[in-house]
């Protein structure tokens, strides 16, 4: 919808909520998962967000979050590649 | 990421704090938690001293990741190997989302590598831990494909009660209907035990229902039935004697006896207030020398009580047994796809990060392939 903020802004807002106790500034190449910045509930919320954005359920048997979602750019690429339609 | 945490191994001095921390996971009852810690870790037959990684903040225990010992067997003739299953991941609420899980697991994997463990396996992960594990290099070998059976009688009376509760004038009598608690909680399994044996007219005189685990006879039966070489737990007398003492669960044993024990079926229910379900009863182990005995035990279990929700994992059971379950009325638990679904699954990981996934194997059996496993719910702490 035209009133929605761009996807990158929505993603950054979500990640900032999930990493609020951290001092790390989020950039496109900041390591989110391998660094341990995002884990547990924050990671779970990210996965739900990705499912919502792509309109499809994640296949857990082939999922490799540390490889595919470690950076903002990686997440955006994943969403673009898995978006339905 | 904050790094003001210290990862240490469990020592008995930490016992009280661990029991307290586990009020976030095991149960709100510290005595029950203490009993569980003692059973699962301090009395584990395969891993002594206990292997629990604790995160300290200052001098306070704020996180824990435990490993419990198991013994695998695989191949023909069976090769046996000690192993570990990571379990019980808990972080104090005020320390969550600070990278502590990653710190603890990195420390744990470094230590496990030094101890020489090649792989870790998990059959008990909930949906959040499952996703976190995948992010740390674990792989899912697939769902346990749970199936469940519902009592038609229970469902019927539930519908009657619901209808009565909404009907003018008679709603006040709804709570006086028989079976009014169905759907909320299952009666304790132990109440179903009958030392005199079950009603002969239905079950014959060969099946007895007991609270007592006959570990020696069960182990002997498992040994007599043999092994097809798939990866499974060693279920010897020592293991079975230990396994069914879990204080967070209740167990009930159905035995089929002729000259020797010819089969058994173990039912389990949860005790803790934090349990996944107050009504669920699980079939956690089931062995028999023939399909006739297997079917007899299952039918006897069904007739024991009008179970609201009787569950079993079916991912690795044979076609004959699957057909039997279907004939009796078991149906697949609806497992939606996606991260939000609680799906019991097998997670595996090489302890060393530099071993390619294609090489993860026990014997010549690839551990990520569910076809190479023979899994019972008792291998998991869900059972």
Image (cartoon, coloured by chain):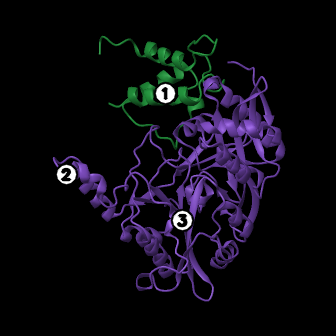
Q: In which quarter of the image is residue B182?
A: bottom left
Locate residue B253, reporting x and y percent.
57, 70
Residues at marks 2 and 3, CA–CA distance in whole angstroms: 34 Å
Residue at the disc numbered 2: B170
Tags 1 and 2 in contact by the CB under 8 Å rule? no
Q: Is residue B234 visible?
A: no
- Chain of the residue displaying label 1: A
Secondary structure, mark 2, is loop
Dot 1 and dot 2 within a common chain: no
Tell whether B310 sits left or right of B5: left
- Chain of the residue displaying label 2: B
Q: Nearer the viewer, mark 2 or mark 3?
A: 2
Residues at marks 1 and 3, CA–CA distance in whole angstroms: 41 Å
A69 versus B254 height, above or below: above
Tags 2 and 3 in contact by the CB under 8 Å rule? no
Locate residue B45, reporting x and y percent.
77, 58
- Chain of the residue displaying label 3: B
Residue nearer the viewer, B246 or B353 = B246
Q: Quadrant of residue B158?
A: bottom left
Is the residue marked by circle 2 packed among few (<14), some (14-19), or many (20+) residues within 10 Å?
few
Residues at marks 1 and 2, CA–CA distance in whole angstroms: 46 Å
Secondary structure, mark 1, is helix
Chain with colour purple in the figure: B
Secondary structure, mark 3, is helix
Chain with colour green in the figure: A
Q: Which of marks 1 and 3 is in front?
A: 3
Residue at the disc numbered 1: A45
What residue is rendered at 70% in x and 66% in y? B241
Residue at the disc numbered 3: B190
């Amino acid at each position: 919808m035209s009133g929605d903020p761009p996807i990158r802004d929505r993603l950054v807002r979500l990640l900032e909520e999930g990493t609020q106790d951290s001092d790390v500034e989020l950039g496109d190449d900041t390591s989110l998962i391998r660094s341990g910045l995002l884990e547990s509930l924050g990671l779970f919320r990210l996965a739900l967000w990705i499912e919502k954005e792509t309109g499809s359920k994640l296949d857990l048997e082939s999922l490799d979050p540390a490889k595919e979602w470690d950076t903002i750019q990686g997440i955006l690429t994943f969403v673009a590649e898995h978006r339905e339609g | 990421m904050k790094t003001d945490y210290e990862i240490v191994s469990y020592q008995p001095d930490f016992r009280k704090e661990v029991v307290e921390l586990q009020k976030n996971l095991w149960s709100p009852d510290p005595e029950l938690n203490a009993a569980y810690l003692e059973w699962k870790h301090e009395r584990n037959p395969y891993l002594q001293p206990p292997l629990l990684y604790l995160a300290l903040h200052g001098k306070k225990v704020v996180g824990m990741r435990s490993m419990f010992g198991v013994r695998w067997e695989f191949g023909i003739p069976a090769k046996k190997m000690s192993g570990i299953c990571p379990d019980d991941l808990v972080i104090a609420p005020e320390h969550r989302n600070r990278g502590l899980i990653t710190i603890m697991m990195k420390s744990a994997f470094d230590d496990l590598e030094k101890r020489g463990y090649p792989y870790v396996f998990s059959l008990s992960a909930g949906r959040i831990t499952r996703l976190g594990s995948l992010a740390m290099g674990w792989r899912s070998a697939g769902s346990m494909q749970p199936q469940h059976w519902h009592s038609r009688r229970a469902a019927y009376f539930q519908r009657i009660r619901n209808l009565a509760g909404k009907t003018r004038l008679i709603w006040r009598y709804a709570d006086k209907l028989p079976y009014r608690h169905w759907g909320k909680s299952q009666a304790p399994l132990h109440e179903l035990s009958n030392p005199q044996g079950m009603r002969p007219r239905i079950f014959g005189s060969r099946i007895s229902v007991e609270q007592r685990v006959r570990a020696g006879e069960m182990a002997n039966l498992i040994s007599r039935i043999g092994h097809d070489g798939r990866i499974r737990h060693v279920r010897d007398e020592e293991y079975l004697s230990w396994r069914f003492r879990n204080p967070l669960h209740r167990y009930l044993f159905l035995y089929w006896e002729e000259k020797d024990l010819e089969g058994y079926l173990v039912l389990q229910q949860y005790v803790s207030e934090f349990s996944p379900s107050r009504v669920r009863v699980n079939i956690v182990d089931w062995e028999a020398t023939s399909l006739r005995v297997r079917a007899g035990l299952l039918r006897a279990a069904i007739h024991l009580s009008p179970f609201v929700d009787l569950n079993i994992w079916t991912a690795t059971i044979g076609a004959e047994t699957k057909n039997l379950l279907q004939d009796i009325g078991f149906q697949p638990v609806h497992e939606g796809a996606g991260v939000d679904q609680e799906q019991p699954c097998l997670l595996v990981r090489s302890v060393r990060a530099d071993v390619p996934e294609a090489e993860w194997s026990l014997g010549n059996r690839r551990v990520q392939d569910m076809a190479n496993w023979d899994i019972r719910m008792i291998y998991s702490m869900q059972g």
